[in-house]
Amino acid sequence: MSRLRLWLVVLAGLTGIVAEEDLYRRVLIFRKDPSDAYVVLRAKLEQPLQNFTVCLRSYTDLTRPYSLFSYATKAQDNEILVFKPKPSEYRFYVGGKFVTFRVPEGRGDWEHVCASWESATGIAEFWFNGKPWPRKGLQRGYAVGAEAAILLGQEQDAFGGGFDVYNSFSGELADVYLWDTGLSPDKMRAAYQSLRLPPAVLAWKSLSYEVRGDVVVKPRLRELQHCPATHGVAEVIRDRGTCPQCLSPTHTRCPQAPCQPPGSAGSQGPPPDCQTALWVSAPGHLGTKVTGKRHRVRAGTDPEQPGAGTRWLRSSLSTELWAAGTRGAMGQLCLCLLALTGLFGLAAPQEKVTAQIRAHPPAPTLYYQLMLSCEVTGDPSPQEFLWEKEGSHKPLQKGPDNILLFPTFNKTHLGTYICRATGSLGTAVAKYHLWIDDLVYKAFVFPQETKHSHVLVKAKLEQPLQNFTVCLWSYTDLTRPYSLFSYATKAQDNEILLFKPNPNEYQFYVGGKSVSFRIPKNTVESEHVCASWESTTGIVGFWFNGKPWPRKGLQKGYTVREEASIVLGQEQDSFGGGFDPQQSFVGEISSVYLWDMGICTSTVEAAMHDRLADAPVFGWRNFPYEIMGEVYLKFQPPRA
């Protein structure tokens, strides 16, 4: 029976008969180089494609350019094209335009690729051997024509023809699929592992095809086998029976114990290797001047969790409240003038009494302390503060305290809060909408080089920075210079800048001065970096993928101004603008954090997995942002 099937396949190749069969564990072999042979695929598309995914597996030793999958319409010969111009690069075409993905140069192994595209955003995904590459973008709003000639092994320069034999494929092809939708990450990995897949327009297990020229169907000599759970997927010789070293083993890092703020469970104070932030008292202590010292304050109780006791309060506030006093004859004269003003109504027109609620920190972090302060202007001595929450029948807090404290902020606290401040001059009312924008398992995708597109971080710092740390993940195959994190003030465009001038180097700027850190050459992997700076010593710390680099120094005694424009994906050459497209970022950015203090290595490792040990000024668990231009927020699978 098997001999009969092989004979029918050969006959189909000679006569052009259309075959439809299950090709599981079988391959198409393009025997000659160069060649005019190809395979025609038959698919019934009822309407133009707004989204699609194409996957296939190839095995060749070619070093010249070649075409793998060509989908041409009468209007556009490169409507969809998967093309390999050289061993370390793939090109993915949609509607005649293409994006490039750099890959490791082959070592005589099978290569599995999946490429997907969505019209609504123009986002193109590329997966290489089960791993996603940095997403890019092209042809936003385009529609792929339905009436098409679909070929394997040749590039069409005209509808159904126009071949160049020096772009032909020679080798083995298998597992070809085309879907009229984008696939989820799980399904992309399933395609790589030859597992169960959703119904497809073209499917290897029920492929309608026609062989033209010297192409034969044979059993696959190499197949996939799964390694133990601690490894990835390996490709092994059939029936070898054992699993050799995997191509892409996963490495797990055991994080150290995180740094904990004073007052947290099991902590008597900050760990010795951690630099702590300012620990200051809440506002309202007349006659004291508090700046950067640790104070024990009455935390009161969580308004929605009674029973909380005294705690250390972490805040970036510096309180300077002074009691007005009288001294000597001048003081008596002042008192006299005040008395006359009260008797005869000679006072200046009264300022309108207003109230405003502020959050500290401005971008609250889940499971950390949050403080709402009700700040009154126009009344020097408000006597009572009534705190309420919309939808709640009972007041949360009533008394002279203008602070509403959440010892452990969580999602049950979300909502609208109302403060009614009453004093001798009347009552002022303020509202505050408490919300979070948790971006865990999401990433900003910058699909293409641009002069305008970026992400604006909408966070307002409360005071200048004497210490800070910035951390983020990035994923790109760029080899030219690009900017990741740009913090500009009106006086200095490079107040804080995280910049990568080439693949082997990071530059870190503070106040317009920079230091460089050399890193290993990357082969398209996600990179996590943290950079910290302290004013008193000028010491700069730098961590690459969780590992500390030798410390350096710059700008000792400098102060980073708080009124800033914070941008992801572009370098600011002026406050909020002055972008250079040749320094724009293309790829993915995620897990962005800024602290107003230095952090330790264990906190860096926690930030890599969005499990924080210290509350930041802003961070990925509640990220205040506005997208400007063509940037997209997309799902990102959990990291191993």
Image (tube, grey):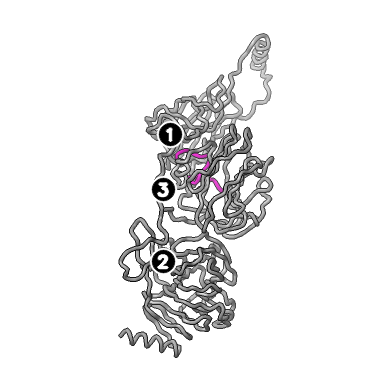
Magenta span includes 618: yes
Viewer-nearest of labels 1 and 2? 2
**Residue at 45% across / 84% down in the picture?**
211
Earlier in the chain: of badge 1 and badge 3, it is 3
Q: Are marks 2 and 3 in contact (CB under 8 Å)?
A: no
Q: Are marks 1 and 2 in contact (CB under 8 Å)?
A: no
**Residue at 56% across / 38% down in the picture?**
468
Which class describes the residues within 10 Å of circle 3: few (<14), some (14-19), or many (20+)? Answer: few
What amino acid type should be assigned to the residue bearing mark 2? Tyr
- The residue pinned by badge 2 equals 192
Mark-to-mark CA distance, 1 and 2: 47 Å
Residue 253: numbered disc: 3
Mark-to-mark CA distance, 1 and 3: 31 Å
Viewer-nearest of labels 2 and 3? 3
Earlier in the chain: of badge 2 and badge 3, it is 2
What amino acid type should be assigned to the residue bearing mark 3? Arg
Query: x, y (%) of residue 502?
Result: 60, 54
Say which quarter of the image contains residue 378.
Answer: top right
Magenta segment's dominant SS is loop
- The residue pinned by badge 1 equals 407
Q: Nearer the viewer, residue 419 or 285?
A: 285
Earlier in the chain: of badge 1 and badge 2, it is 2
Examine the rendering and report whether any part of residue 92 can be seen: no
Secondary structure of the residue carrying numbered label 2: helix
Numbered range of the magenta stretch = 613-625
Residue 433: numbered disc: none
Which class describes the residues within 10 Å of circle 2: few (<14), some (14-19), or many (20+)? Answer: many
